[in-house]
Image (cartoon, rainbow, N blue to C red):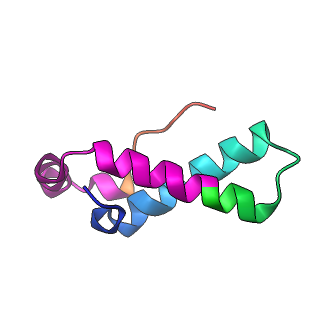
């Protein structure tokens, strides 16, 4: 699956979570590096997802408004 297939809410959720995690792990990193790492991480996550299954799941209920919370 491609990143473009993610719903805007899911994309924003992943972006916020990974930005937070990378900023905690790499306090020394410049914002451009964090942004690049986050983008790459989201791309890799999306590539591992099955597009048809994702579409079925978001069609069943409004998962986009309640993504699974990742513990920090």
Q: Quadrant of the N terminus?
A: bottom left
Q: Quadrant of the C terminus?
A: top right
Provide residue 28's location: percent of width, then percent of height: 88, 47
The residue nearer to you, when weighing 47 against 56, is 47
Q: Residue furthest right?
A: 28
Provide residue 26's location: percent of width, then percent of height: 80, 42
The number of numbered badges drawn on the structure is 0
Provide residue 61's location: percent of width, then percent of height: 19, 53
**Is 57 contained in the magenta span?**
yes
The residue nearer to you, when weighing 40 against 19, is 40
**Quarter where residue 8 is shown:** bottom left
Q: Is residue 68 left or right of residue 19?
A: left
Provide residue 30's location: percent of width, then percent of height: 83, 59
Residue that appears at 67% across and 41% down? 21
Task: Identify the magenta region.
Answer: 37-64
**Is 60 contained in the magenta span?**
yes
The residue nearer to you, when weighing 40 against 72, is 40
Residue that appears at 41% across and 47% down? 44
Q: Is most of the magenta stretch helix, strand or loop? A: helix
């Amino acid at each position: 699956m491609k990143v473009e297939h993610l719903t805007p809410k899911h994309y924003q959720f992943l972006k916020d979570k990974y930005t937070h995690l990378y900023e905690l792990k790499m306090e020394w990193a410049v914002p451009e590096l964090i942004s690049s790492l986050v983008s790459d991480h989201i791309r890799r996550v999306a590539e591992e997802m099955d597009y048809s299954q994702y579409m079925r799941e978001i069609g069943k209920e409004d998962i986009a408004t309640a993504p699974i919370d990742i513990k920090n």
